Image (spheres, rainbow, N blue to C red):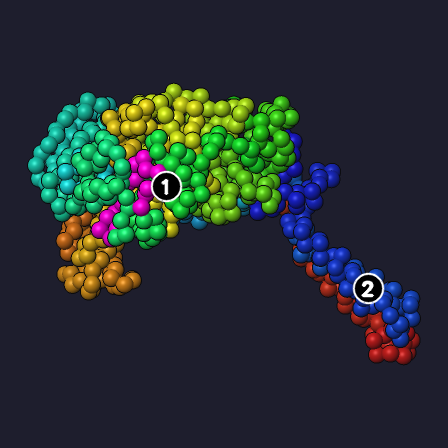
């Protein structure tokens, strides 16, 4: 692969200082420090050579030269000189087995002790066994980190299910930095296991149908059917037999009374661990929030809202909006909206606004330049994308190696979606970044960039943060967009922090899942931190919605969900195709959620002050919302209004919120009221005016209560899943380890022998040498001048004549 390497945290401009001479790489970690050298030389010239001093010109020139050498050495030390030499290193073969003895390993065979005995007695290689998980605690990442040594190797016997501490990705990064390897022993389940869980809303309104999903997972052993039973408030509502080891039941419930309601799912069947056969969930049901509907016409959307909320109707916005949670404005011209100042204050203070389009609104209603326009996530006019500064950051790490051909294919497909109007650069990354193609107009350089992508090779650990920093450096001072293509097999914390910094400077990160095993959660969080979007590899055509321009216009069929990972669009299915849409475009910082068939924004949202604003700009030929009011499309309207409403209890007093939790994990109870509440065995503390919090750590499963709220306490996280995780394979690939079976004692011993004597890249820092030479040079120069005085060769105390 062509391009210049960039170490983690090093900028593209700094790369030019790294060169390879005769197999030895020489470089500077902080080459920008070299800019201090000219300033130091000028300062020395001013102090030593300028003017007519008492010393001779020859002595001053010698002093100037000596001080320049010292300054050069000090600046070089500040720049961080280093060398990387490839050499063969030797050591004593030794096997470190990391044994996970936590509860999730109950369903697997205990192979650690038998394996250790065989390696020592049959193969003659010493074995150290260290426990990295025990009981209900699985800090496996911490265990790996604690047992790593430079140029060493460990073998992990675990299912890889981390419940606390450092992630496996973080441990793999540490191993890579130490030039160490992590291998794993592949272990299969020998006992059957069933685990049940329930997902769904934690808060809903009276009379609103809510959807829940009860799911059964377990080991892959075919040991018979599972019986799944669901109860709500003690009443059995479903009981079904799941023929396979797992499955799911979707069910709905409409609650007709306020307060806390209790949902319980129970699974029975062949099983090993009993603690996870029951899952509990609480749902807090609140009165219908009050919504103001503003329109001058009669539309079906009003009736639809009335089925879900307590709706008041008005032809314009009044001055007093205190009793409402959100305002819905449908097809109203800017001059007819009413008290826009009151509406603006209403939203800024934390309430919601939904503006629905039509023949009398947006560009048809004089919104451009009006007071209401500043509140909206859309502007008016041509909705197609224009030119943009784009950097594609492509993951070429070891975790992507097996799917590198797929990576390139997805990258080329993503590039194909970008219009000619864009400026595009390419950065590749593993644990450092590489400049592949400098930013250039795509219209003239598409073939060149495609060729550079095809030439990429893979290898090394994954550090997504390095790729994002490389992309940021390539953008320079320009705002733009980073399109990150990765499998997401890395710790999310540092990468999310960099993405957040990019977003704060106006650069969003669009992530695309590319690879054999994709960690979507990591990629989704990175995107959201910057205000960007996550796409699966099959969804790259949606890039045309943002960057297609005239040459790559989006061509869909009906409404298309642009970002399926937001509150409004998650779980939404769209089948309708409204024939009309207002002519709008997405404003910077807004979320583009749904597009029409030609790519025009149909639904968008953003935060305005403390509140939320959404726009629905697709509509029917008769001015109604057409098929959007019919299932399944109607869900997106419900969620849009719910997004604007936010917490439906935020205006109420004497209200307690408390989230469900698990054994071993705390939850926080929040009370809003005038005075500190008095609850048995719970101590509330004031955190702001009228808001009090208490931390609760339960010690047994079941339903508990605090004040007027119920919360569920479920089984420990350790019992939530069984069997090997996908991250184990990524750790092996990232660190250059091996995947062994429980009978591979000889292979493990041989690998230990190979690892003890192998060719490695050894990095040596020479900062200390530069500092030492600078110090010696300075003292030598001082000593020479003092000798001049001592020997009488100088008449001045400085030693200069």
Please, what secondary structure does the residue beneath circle 2 have?
A: helix
x and y, in percent, of residue 760 in the image: 60, 39
Query: Residue 418 lies in magenta, yes or no?
Result: no
Q: Which residues are magenta?
A: 321-338
Q: Residue at x 51, y 47 (%)?
A: 505
Q: Residue at x 42, y 31 (%)?
A: 583
Label 2, residues with CA under 10 Å away: few <14, some 14-19, many ≥20: some
x and y, in percent, of residue 365 in the image: 38, 36
Quick check: 421 left or right of 569?
right
Mark 2 or 1, which is nearer the eye?
A: 1
Residue receiving disc 1? 334
Residue 708 visible (yes or no): yes
Quadrant of the image occupied by residue 229: top left
Residue receiving disc 2? 45
Residue 92 visible (yes or no): no
Quadrant of the image occupied by residue 792: bottom right
User: Eyeballing the image, is 594 above or below 72?
Assistant: above
Quick check: 36 left or right of 395?
right
Q: Nearer the viewer, residue 169 or 444?
A: 444
User: Eyeballing the image, is 241 above or below 488?
Assistant: above
């Amino acid at each position: 692969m062509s391009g210049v390497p960039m170490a983690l945290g090093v900028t593209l401009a700094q790369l030019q200082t790294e060169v390879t001479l005769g197999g030895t790489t020489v470089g500077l970690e902080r080459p920008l420090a070299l800019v201090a050298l000219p300033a130091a030389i000028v300062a020395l010239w001013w102090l030593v050579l300028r003017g007519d001093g008492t010393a001779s010109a020859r002595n001053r020139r010698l002093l100037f030269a000596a001080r320049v050498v010292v300054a050069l050495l000090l600046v070089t030390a500040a720049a961080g000189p280093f060398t990387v030499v490839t050499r063969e290193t030797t050591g004593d073969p030794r096997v470190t087995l990391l044994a996970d003895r936590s509860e999730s390993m109950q369903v697997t065979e205990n192979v650690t002790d038998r394996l250790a005995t065989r390696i020592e007695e049959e193969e003659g290689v010493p074995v150290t066994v260290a426990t990295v998980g025990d009981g209900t605690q699985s800090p496996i990442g911490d265990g790996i980190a604690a047992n790593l040594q430079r140029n060493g190797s460990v073998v992990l016997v675990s299912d890889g299910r981390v419940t606390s501490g450092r992630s496996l990705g973080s441990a793999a990064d540490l191993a890579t930095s130490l030039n160490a390897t992590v291998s794993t022993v592949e272990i299969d389940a020998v006992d059957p296991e069933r685990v049940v869980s329930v997902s769904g809303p934690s808060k809903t309104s009276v009379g609103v149908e809510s959807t829940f999903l009860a799911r059964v997972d377990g080991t892959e052993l075919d040991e018979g059917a599972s019986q799944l039973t669901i109860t709500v408030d003690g009443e059995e509502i479903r009981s079904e037999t799941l023929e396979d080891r797992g499955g799911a039941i979707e069910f709905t419930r409409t609650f007709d009374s306020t307060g806390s309601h209790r949902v319980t799912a129970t699974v029975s069947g062949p099983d090993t661990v009993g603690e996870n056969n029951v899952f509990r969930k609480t749902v807090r049901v609140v009165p219908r929030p009050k919504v103001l509907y503003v329109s001058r016409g009669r539309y079906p959307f009003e009736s639809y809202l009335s089925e879900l909320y307590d709706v008041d109707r008005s032809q314009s916005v009044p001055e007093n909006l205190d009793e409402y949670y959100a305002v819905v404005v449908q097809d109203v011209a800017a001059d007819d909206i009413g008290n826009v100042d009151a509406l603006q204050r209403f939203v800024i203070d934390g309430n919601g606004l939904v503006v629905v389009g039509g023949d009398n609104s947006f560009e048809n209603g004089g919104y451009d330049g009006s007071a209401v326009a500043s509140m909206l996530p859309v502007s008016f006019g041509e909705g197609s994308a224009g030119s943009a500064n784009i950097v594609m950051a492509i993951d070429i790490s070891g975790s992507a190696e097996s799917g590198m051909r797929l990576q390139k294919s997805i990258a080329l497909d993503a590039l194909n979606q970008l219009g000619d109007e864009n400026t595009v650069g390419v950065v590749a990354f593993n644990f450092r970044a590489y400049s592949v193609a400098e930013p250039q107009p795509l219209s003239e350089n598409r073939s060149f960039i495609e060729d550079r992508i095809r030439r990429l090779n893979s290898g090394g650990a994954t550090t997504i943060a390095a790729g994002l920093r490389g992309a940021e450096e390539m953008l320079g001072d320009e705002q733009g967009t980073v399109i990150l293509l990765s499998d997401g097999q890395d710790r999310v914390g540092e990468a999310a922090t960099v993405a957040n910094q990019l977003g704060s400077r106006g650069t969003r990160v669009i992530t695309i899942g590319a690879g054999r095993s994709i960690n979507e959660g990591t990629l989704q969080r990175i995107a959201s931190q910057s205000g960007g979007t996550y796409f699966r590899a099959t969804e790259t055509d949606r890039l045309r919605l943002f960057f297609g321009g005239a040459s790559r216009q989006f061509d869909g069929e009906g409404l298309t969900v642009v970002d399926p990972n937001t509150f409004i669009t998650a779980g939404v299915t769209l089948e309708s195709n409204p024939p009309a849409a207002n002519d709008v475009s997405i404003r910077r910082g807004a979320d583009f959620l749904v597009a029409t068939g030609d790519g025009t924004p149909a639904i968008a949202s953003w935060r305005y002050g403390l509140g939320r604003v959404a726009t629905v700009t697709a509509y029917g030929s008769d001015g109604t919302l057409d098929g959007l009011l019919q299932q399944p499309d109607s869900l997106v309207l419900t969620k849009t209004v719910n997004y604007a409403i936010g917490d439906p209890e935020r205006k109420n007093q004497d209200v307690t919120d408390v989230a469900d939790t698990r054994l071993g994990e705390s939850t926080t109870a929040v009370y809003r009221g005038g005075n500190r509440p008095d609850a048995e065995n719970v101590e509330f503390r004031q955190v702001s005016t009228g808001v009090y919090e208490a931390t609760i750590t339960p010690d047994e499963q079941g339903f508990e209560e605090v004040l007027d709220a119920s919360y569920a306490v479920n089984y420990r996280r350790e019992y939530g899943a069984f069997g090997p995780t996908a991250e184990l394979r990524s750790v092996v690939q990232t660190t250059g380890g091996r995947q062994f079976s429980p009978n591979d004692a000889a292979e493990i011993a041989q690998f230990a022998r190979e690892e003890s004597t192998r060719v490695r890249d050894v990095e040596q820092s020479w900062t200390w040498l530069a500092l030492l030479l600078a110090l010696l040079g300075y003292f030598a120069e001082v000593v020479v001048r003092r000798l001049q005085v001592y020997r009488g060769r100088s008449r001045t105390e400085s030693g200069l004549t």
